Amino acid sequence: MTAFVLVSGPFTGGWVWRDVVARLRAAGAEAYAVTLSGMEPGSTLGAADVDLDTHVEDVVRVVDGIVAAGAGEVVLVGHDYGIHPVLGAVDRRPDRCGRVVYLDAGMPADGDPATASLPEGSVAGAAGGLVPAPVGAEWERWGSTAGLSAEALERLDRLAVPQPVRTLTQPLRLTGNPFDRPTTGVLCTANGSGISMVEMLVASGPPRFRVLADPRVGFFELGTGHWPMLSTPGPLAEVLLRAAADEGTRLSVPASAGARPADAGTFPLDVPERPRERRGRVDLHLPEAEGPRPAVLFVHGGPVSPDQRPTPRDSPTLLGYGRHVAGLGAVGATLDHRLYGLADYPRAAEDVTEAVELVRADPRVDGERIALWFFSAGGLLAADWLAAPPSWLRCVALTYPVLAPPPDWRAVPARFDPVRAVGASSPPVVLTRVGLEHPAFGTTVDAFRTAADRAGATVDLVDLPRAHHGFETTEHTEETRAAVARAARAVLRYVAGPAQA
């Protein structure tokens, strides 16, 4: 007999699973809704008594009790924050835990606190070591309330309790691989995530997402908000039973993600090496020209792993762009910024600002003629520069960009939204759009173009109807070569002085 261990997200306890438990038991399964320490209404435990390790031990005790009673497969379900104590328990009892179900939850790794995937400032209001429970409309900040009835929202308000802050800030410690066993992801589409988004991450996101294409990993979607145990308990129970039966959509790494052209490891254009100087996080690719020259700073996407090798500025893409603009007479600057997670946009923005100052201060650079060129999810970093452009910023280039945070990127601060930032005073934009873009990203590009047109902003469009996101390393075609050259020429026209125009 399958035994489900159900661990809920912040501010809630076992009561939130009431209707799901009833349906699972009616189907012949065992179900245990865990109320973690300090999370029961009226708890007398103080914040100092509870941290993430406490909650991990809570789940371990439940698992040990189930196994001692002779149950069959143990399926652990972690909703939102609940995936942290679930993974901690699996790490401590790897032989006693079977399948893990991520219910509208992130993918924490060793060393990650829950705050890494929470909205900015989520724990800032903690008083006495406790994060106050949301009330009413405040729940929306922690996840979509789509599908919740007025009665369900009232129940959340009435039974929610403050969350001990150390459960959210203490890093998760894992000694093994969380994906070394059958795994299921249940995605709540009204909260912004869906299988198509996961497919995008597998195809062109950081390499760590390739694990989601493992044949032991399956996916389901629920057309509801972030609280399916309250909004759709019947469909959720059905999905959990199907997950235990090893059903679910399987993903694969598309051929384009692993394929390489014959000239793998090179840039679509044949660009010779140029003199390169490394200055901290920044490399300068120098032209063969006299006098201060315009400069183009290239800003990669992400998130990327801090351990990724080669780092973005040593990748064929940024090396190629930096060398290409140097060959056109400008200084090509490439940057390794610290966008390691969705909550890191403020830190990455600081890195971009610091890099701009370094580039402008170099005597070989004309500090009044600068362009910033953003790629992929680095496009969100363009918002500050579009909203309040300095006089020396002559152009912003955007290549297969993300131009508004997708709905489930809750950890991204609101300021990083180029759709809202673009205006009449924005500098000219050179936008490279790929026709085979991930739908979640493509909609942000469409919204940006609409906002730019409405504001009267200048947008030069470079279209690649048959190209994919990240085409430089996988698609060396006449179309991609022409597009790279055209975008670079457009940028250089904006930054060139009269003598070079």
Image (cartoon, rainbow, N blue to C red):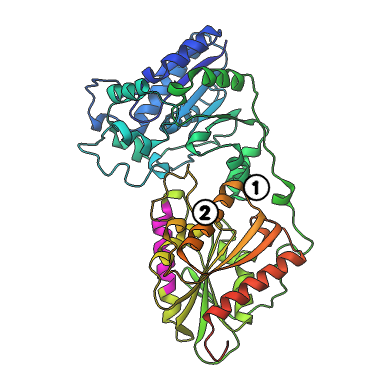
Q: Which residue is mark 2?
A: 447
Q: Which residue is mark 1?
A: 203
Whether residue 130 is visible: yes
Residue 215 image offset from top left, x and y in percent: 68, 33
Write the residue at 69% across / 50% down.
257
Q: Amino acid at mark 2?
A: Ala
In this rendering, the label closer to the viewer, 1 or 2: 2
Q: Secondary structure at mark 2?
A: helix
Q: Is residue 50 left or right of residue 368?
A: left
Q: Amino acid at mark 1?
A: Ala
Q: Is residue 345 left or right of residue 124?
A: right
**Which labelled disc corresponds to residue 139?**
none
Q: Secondary structure at mark 1?
A: helix
Residue 46 image offset from top left, x and y in percent: 22, 28
Residue 142 image offset from top left, x and y in percent: 38, 37
Q: Residues within 10 Å of mark 2 (few under 14, many from 20)?
A: some
What secondary structure predominates along the stretch shown in magenta?
A: helix
Question: In the rendered image of this protein, does residue 462 appear above or below residue 181?
Answer: below
Say whether residue 345 is magenta: yes
Question: In the rendered image of this protein, does residue 349 appear above or below residue 211?
Answer: below
Whether residue 338 is visible: no
> Outermost residue toward the left?
128
Q: Quadrant of the C terminus?
A: bottom right
**C-alpha distance separating marks 1 and 2:** 23 Å
Question: Could you tell me how many numbered marks the image carries?
Answer: 2
Query: What is the span of residues highlighted in magenta in the rendered image?
Result: 344-356
